[in-house]
Image (spheres, rainbow, N blue to C red):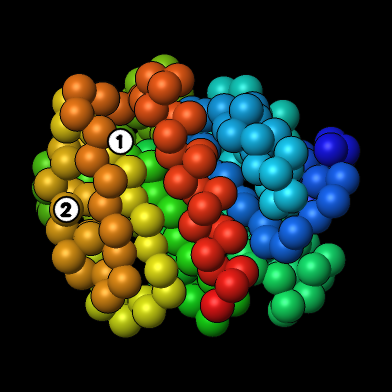
Amino acid sequence: MRIAEKQIARHGRTVDAVYYIPDAPHGGTVIFSHGYNGHKSDFAREAEYLAKNGVCAVTYTFCGGSTRDTSGFPTQSMTLFTERDDLFAVMDDVLAAQGTGGTLVLFGGSQGGMVSVLAARERAAEIGGLALLFPALCIPDNWRTFYPEGTPLPPEVDFWGMKLGEGFIRTVRTVDAYEGMERFIRPVRLFHGTEDAVVPLAYSERAAALFPHAELTVYPGEGHGFSREAMDDVVRRLLAFVRDLRKK
């Protein structure tokens, strides 16, 4: 396995990415998108596992999506849509390297899962499959509750240790997390715990019912942030998922 750092420029921003490249690639690439205030290292262990088993993996940090981001893009300028565009930049870089013959899977955790859904909605034809780890499909509902329509929006808010700008709140309230799911015909895998206090399991249950080809794996006792044992199971299932897609 070889690890390569890469800077991907797009829209005046530079996405900090890491490529995990197998010694003997068997095909397929998984792009890992981290959650709120996360980092490219969050899924390093899972990316290494895939690469050691012949699947290329990419992790990256959203510009302005983390207090550990080094791009210089302010967290106050980050929105779900700037993060979606960062994912597009990584997708374009992967597709330029592997062409259309490879299988591309988007894997998103928490807010990264919501962003992966937004990206899949726009570019379904380029994606072989979608894998979502406790996807935060509740985010638009949450912010509509925090700031109902007509409520004055603050120029800045400190949320869970990171400063967000008015643009995040204004744009997130317009999002329908489930829009178009019934038209996404690629295979989907969802992973969610029964004790998730941040994103209720019901959000993934609804998504699994809407996606035409979805499978939801429920983990008893797991919360928002899986144990190592549960994550080991997730990455094994993810590897099998990519291998199955390659056979089709």
Q: Residue at x 54, y 44 (%)?
A: 33
Residue where numbered disc 2 is placed: 205
Going by the image, does 116 lie left or right of 136? right
Is residue 38 depicted above or below 239 in this figure? above
Front residue of 11/62: it is 62
Of residues 160 and 190, the one nearer the viewer is 190
**On-image quarter of the N terminus:** top right
Where is residue 243? Give x, y as percent: 58, 60
The tag on residue 154 is 1
- Residue 119, percent across and down? 49, 64
Q: Nearer the viewer, residue 112 or 97?
A: 97
User: In the image, what residue occupies the spot 16% across and 53% down?
Assistant: 205
- Residue 19, numbered circle: none
Amino acid bearing label 2: Glu
Q: Residue at x 70, y 34 (%)?
A: 48
Q: Is residue 104 above or below residue 225?
A: below
Tell me where residue 138 appears, x and y as whole percent.
Answer: 22, 46
Expressed as whole percent of the image width and height from the top left, the position of residue 8 reads 79, 51
For residue 104, what is the image quadrant?
bottom right
**Res 178 → quadrant:** bottom left
